[in-house]
Image: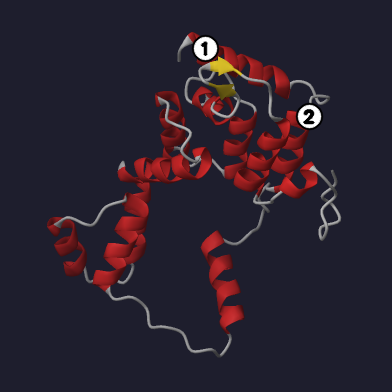
């Protein structure tokens, strides 16, 4: 991490220590909104139950065959198609739970953190450039399976002293710099990005006026 990047990490950290600053206050509200609900059943069971309830008696497409499933899951979780050896091994496996085994092995493999890093870089940075510390942070987050609330906290309150998490500061520094120099904090712009990208809400209308259809979005 260079000296300039380090200074921004320290500055972002100082913001997070004061509730009277506008950026961390908005950040805390939005992070609280996306805290995951705690349930007793496995997530995939909940998803299946909700889908089954929604489908009801409707006719659905047949399940994918092994070849289609293998290609899709490899592209989704590894970012590549299977090798011929991987394909033959999967097709030759006749055990009932081989699809779950494949998914688990991909999630535990080296391709998955790289694939998720690539996807989330595009989603979160939106063509604002790259930084090796940012890449390191994203790969660490997915390799260690950090929950989204911890990732959101790292993005909004970067920790300069944590070697694995400090690269998260790039989410802020890339938005708070202009032509290589420190720029004035664009609170409305940063609020819009945090709302869209982290909390999944569009707060843009509240920059100029109360939202016309959502009562909670005030100027």
Q: Find residue 22 and name its label.
A: 2
Label 2: how many residues lie within 10 Å, few (<14), some (14-19) or many (20+)?
Answer: some
Q: Quadrant of the C terminus?
A: top right
Q: Position of residue 162 (x, y in %)?
A: 53, 20
The residue lying furthest to the top in this view is 3
Near-viewer residue (185 or 33): 185
Between disc 1 and disc 2, whose residue precedes?
A: 1
Q: Position of residue 73 (x, y in %)?
A: 34, 60
Label 2: state its secondary structure: helix
- Direction from residue 33 to residue 200 in the image, left or right: left
Q: Residue at x 22, y 71 (%)?
A: 94
Residue placed under numbered mark 1 in the picture? 4
Quadrant assignment, res 41 = bottom right
Near-viewer residue (150 or 116): 116
**Residues under numbered marks 1 and 2 in contact, where contact means CB atoms less than 8 Å apart:** no
Quadrant assignment, res 75 = bottom left
- Direction from residue 120 to residue 169 in the image, left or right: right
- Direction from residue 89 to residue 104 in the image, left or right: right
Near-viewer residue (205 or 115): 205
* Residue 11 versus residue 171 in the image, above or below: above
Q: Residue at x 67, y 53 (%)?
A: 38
Q: CA distance from mark 1 to mark 2?
A: 23 Å
Near-viewer residue (168 or 67): 168
Label 1: state its secondary structure: helix
Q: Position of residue 89 (x, y in %)?
A: 17, 61
Q: Quadrant of the N terminus?
A: top left
Examine the rendering and report whether any part of residue 101 can be seen. Answer: no
* Residue 98 versus residue 133 in the image, above or below: below
- Direction from residue 204 to residue 131 in the image, left or right: left
Q: Position of residue 25 (x, y in %)?
A: 78, 32
């Amino acid at each position: 991490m260079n000296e300039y990047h380090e200074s921004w990490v320290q500055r972002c950290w100082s913001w997070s220590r004061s509730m009277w600053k506008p950026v961390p206050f908005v950040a805390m509200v939005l992070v609280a909104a996306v805290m995951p609900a705690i349930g007793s059943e496995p997530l995939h069971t909940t998803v299946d139950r909700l889908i089954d309830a929604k489908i009801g008696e409707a006719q659905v497409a047949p399940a994918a065959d092994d070849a289609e499933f293998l290609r899709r899951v490899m592209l989704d979780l590894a970012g590549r198609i299977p090798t011929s050896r991987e394909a033959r091994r999967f097709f030759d496996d006749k055990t009932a739970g081989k699809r779950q085994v494949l998914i688990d092995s991909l999630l535990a493999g080296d391709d998955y953190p790289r694939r998720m890093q690539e996807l989330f870089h595009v989603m979160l940075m939106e063509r604002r450039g790259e930084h090796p510390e940012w890449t390191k942070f994203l790969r660490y987050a997915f390799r260690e399976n950090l929950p989204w609330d911890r990732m959101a906290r790292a993005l909004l309150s970067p920790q300069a002293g944590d070697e694995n998490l400090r690269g998260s500061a790039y989410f802020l520094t890339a938005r708070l710099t202009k032509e290589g120099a420190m720029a004035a904090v664009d609170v409305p712009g940063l609020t819009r990005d945090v709302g869209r990208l982290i909390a999944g809400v569009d707060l843009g209308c509240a920059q100029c006026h109360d939202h016309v259809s959502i009562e909670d979005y005030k100027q």
